[in-house]
Amino acid sequence: NAGVTQTPKFRVLKTGQSMTLLCAQDMNHEYMYWYRQDPGMGLRLIHYSVGEGTTAKGEVPDGYNVSRLKKQNFLLGLESAAPSQTSVYFCASSLDWARDQKRYFGPGTRLTVT
Amino acid sequence: AQKVTQAQTEISVVEKEDVTLDCVYETRDTTYYLFWYKQPPSGELVFLIRRNSFDEQNEISGRYSWNFQKSTSSFNFTITASQVVDSAVYFCALSEATGANSKLTFGKGITLSVRP
């Protein structure tokens, strides 16, 4: 039982390049989330999914796209990377939408855009 | 709108000292949940505790204790006899119900350094 895994762990992009971050969970969770963490900002929600085939915008969605083609995977795409997207990205999952459900977080992906 | 404030940004203590990390929240909901997460230098986020708005009992788990006070909208976290391994960033978070969008709002985090 690996929990939540993220690929890759580190990546350096040049401005304008594109990439996809992969999140996978093996806990059969319905809900999945992408957060970004910036110094002094805490974690901010980018996009989330309430189930296979569904996605929704979070707090800071601009410049990102997501897809949830399979229940266990949640992909975060950057179509044209910008230096402002330099951050640590965390994927998380939870069993359902109830308020008491804790998020299980992946180990994070450190992305640098030059 | 919900909000979590962690006014302390960095705290440094010597090993074996007690330390309290403050968390103040704002919400219009009567039912909500509060969380604490730990982020050690390795970077992962570790769940510590979850508390619902109807349960104001303090909780103790080993050297960790939490003081939830609705009257002051605070959910403070105390580490007793701190150890070097407690060095980490600690996040307080609030979850309130909005149907399918159960948003989890994080504070900005408190960096705790425990010196030997």
Image (cartoon, rainbow, N blue to C red):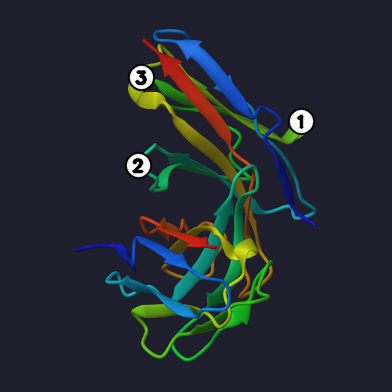
Say the numbered circle drawn on residue A6. Answer: none
Across and down, in percent, residue B96 comes to 66, 58
Tell me the element at label 1. helix
Say the numbered circle drawn on residue B84. Answer: 3
Decide which of B61, B115 is in the foreground and name it: B115
What residue do we see at 64% from left, 30% from top?
A: B9
Label 3 is found on which chain of the structure? Answer: B
Tell me the element at label 3. helix
Say the numbered circle drawn on residue B72. Answer: 1
Label 1 is found on which chain of the structure? Answer: B
* Disc number lying in front (1 or 2): 2
What residue do we see at 65% from left, 33% from top?
A: B23
Q: Amino acid at mark 2?
A: Ser
Q: Earlier in the sequence, mark 2 or mark 3?
A: 2
- Position of residue B68 in the picture relative to residue B2 (left or right): left
Decide which of A100, B114 is in the foreground and name it: B114
What residue do we see at 68% from left, 68% from top?
A: A60
**Residue hosting label 2:** B42
> Is disc 2 in the same subunit as disc 3?
yes
